[in-house]
Amino acid sequence: MIHSDKKVAEFYYKRELEMTNSIKNILINNNFNDDDLDEKVHIMMGLIDNLCHEIIYHKHSEMNYDTMTDLVIDTIKNPFKNDLVN
């Protein structure tokens, strides 16, 4: 519906930005550097969304979803590894 209904698309667009800002604020309040944080959080959300979609809808028997989850976690952690401000 997002592609065919402008109001639905706008609703999801706003919610996505609200989630990005909420997560960003949590990280900043926990002493993370805010350089490129919007972009890092947005990418992180996309990875999690894709992983969930893969696990729930695709269910490929050839895939090890535990391994895939670990890879997503490692991928998410990497851009943040030097961002914790002391």
Image (cartoon, rainbow, N blue to C red):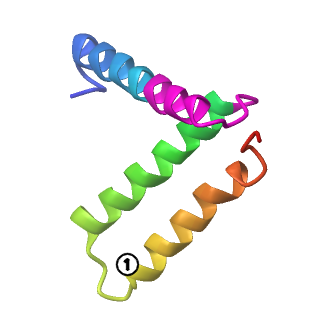
**Image position of 63 (left or right of 42):** left
Q: Residue 56, image x and y in percent?
A: 23, 64
Q: Give whichever of 26, 8 is nearer the camera.
A: 26
Q: Residues within 10 Å of mark 1 (few under 14, many from 20)?
A: some
Q: Is 2 rendered above or below residue 77?
A: above
Image mark count: 1
Instruction: Confirm whether the magenta stretch covers residue 34.
Output: yes
Q: Secondary structure at mark 1?
A: helix
- In the rendered image, the quadrant that contains the N terminus is top left
Q: Residue 6, image x and y in percent?
A: 28, 12
Q: Give whichever of 30, 19 is nearer the camera.
A: 30
Instruction: Confirm whether the magenta stretch covers residue 72.
Output: no
Q: Residue at x 37, y 88 (%)?
A: 62
Q: Give whichever of 11, 78 is nearer the camera.
A: 78
- In the rendered image, the quadrant that contains the C terminus is top right
Give residue 4's quadrant in the image: top left
**Image position of 28 (left or right of 8):** right
Q: Is 64 rendered above or below residue 37?
A: below
Q: Residue at x 74, y 43 (%)?
A: 83
Q: Is 28 rendered above or below residue 43?
A: above
Q: Give whichever of 39, 86 is nearer the camera.
A: 86
Q: Which residue bears the numbered disc 1?
A: 65
As drawn, which residue projects farthest toward the front?
Answer: 86
Residue type (three-letter) at the residue carrying disc 1: Tyr
Q: Residue 52, image x and y in percent?
A: 32, 58
Q: Residue 44, image x and y in percent?
A: 53, 47
Give the magenta range: 20-36
Give residue 58's quadrant in the image: bottom left
Q: Residue at x 57, y 43 (%)?
A: 43
